[in-house]
Image (tube, helix red, strand yellow):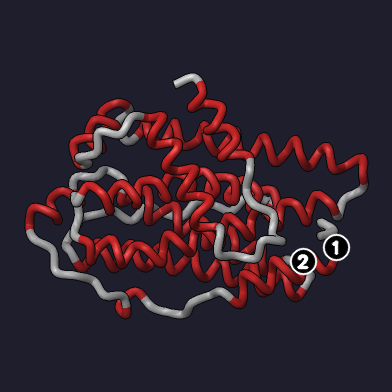
Amino acid sequence: MDWGSDEHKELFCRFFIDTHKPFTPDELPWPDLDGVTIEKLAGFPIWDYAVHTERQVFNKLTAYAAEEPDPLLKEALALQAYEEGRHADILKYFLNRYDIPFKEIPDRPLPDNLERCFMSTGAGECIDSFFAFGFLEISKSTGDYPTELIEVMEPIVQEEARHILFIQNWLLFQKQRRTYALRGVHSFLTLWSFWAAGWSRLMDLKNLGGSAFTIQAREHENSSMSPKDFINLCQRENKRRLAPFDERLARPKLVPRVMSAASFFL
């Protein structure tokens, strides 16, 4: 594949558009949950943040798609914006259905550079998805939550695999379309976006309770998996979830490589 070519653009945009699955939150097979499970879910201090984050991503991508001049890229970006907005709607439907309280956080103003904003947003999604793949698999094995609830989450998490695959190829496409001199600048900005996204998530954890948040998470999960084993699980799940898609598409490499290096020291 000639990265940055029209053929590459056609491949990763058509892949994303053609694999979209239309549904609404109320069409998902939500199970009845007992009071203990609902109380456990309500104990996580993340719901305000999660709904707000998905809504912010929707706003950013909608604005960026509107200014994209290429019709095919515009269609794919607008579709990802729609899916991110649907994720926010799914979260709100889930919380309302089980009477889990959350607060609506006001939207933040959009930045001026929307392309840079999507780069940063995409970096964060790559980080989040890598760990989400592992967490969902742990939930399946520990029996902490009903299988029926996990099955509802399964297609949503798999949708994130589509997102990070699109983001990786969009980043590569944008880099290769630049002059040779500017490709290094793009690579630096990409690395900076991943570093900033990672740091932002560490600060978010701190604001949600720091070490107390970690303790709460361990209290809610019965897994005794070590950090190194968890990273290895995330690596396997990352490969498994991306495997069904066209092998010509570039796979995300930065987060898996960084975590492989980190696991070496654990």
Q: Residues within 10 Å of mark 2 (few under 14, many from 20)?
A: some
Please name whichever residue, 232 or 36, is drawn nearer the observer in this view of the structure. 232
Q: Position of residue 137 (x, y in %)?
A: 34, 50
Locate the C terminus and report the quarter of the image it occupies: top left
Q: Does residue 159 appear left or right of residue 219 in this picture? A: right
**Hey, what amino acid is under mark 2?**
Lys
Q: Does residue 116 appear left or right of residue 264 in this picture? A: right
Residue 197's tag is: none
Q: Residues within 10 Å of mark 1 (few under 14, many from 20)?
A: few
The residue most toward the left is: 35
- The residue under label 2 is 9
Locate the N terminus and report the quarter of the image it occupies: bottom right
Q: Position of residue 12 (x, y in %)?
A: 69, 66
Q: Quarter-wise, where is residue 248 in the image?
A: bottom right
Q: Quarter-wise, where is residue 202 in the image?
A: top left
Q: Does residue 238 appear left or right of residue 210 in this picture? A: right
User: Which residue does the image show at 54% across and 75% down from the upper left?
Assistant: 20
Q: Does residue 145 appear left or right of residue 77 in this picture? A: left
Q: Mark 2 falls on what kind of element?
A: helix
Distance Cα–Cα, label 1 vs label 2: 6 Å
Please name whichever residue, 53 or 124, is drawn nearer the observer in this view of the structure. 124
User: Which residue does the image show at 50% across and 51% down from the upper left?
Assistant: 108
Q: Are the residues at dot 1 and dot 2 in contact (C-beta closer than 8 Å)?
A: yes
Q: Mark 1 falls on what kind of element?
A: loop
- The residue under label 1 is 5
The residue most toward the top is: 265
Question: How many discs appear?
Answer: 2
User: Which residue does the image show at 64% across and 55% down from the upper left?
Assistant: 167
**Hey, what amino acid is under mark 1?**
Ser
Q: Position of residue 48 (x, y in %)?
A: 32, 50
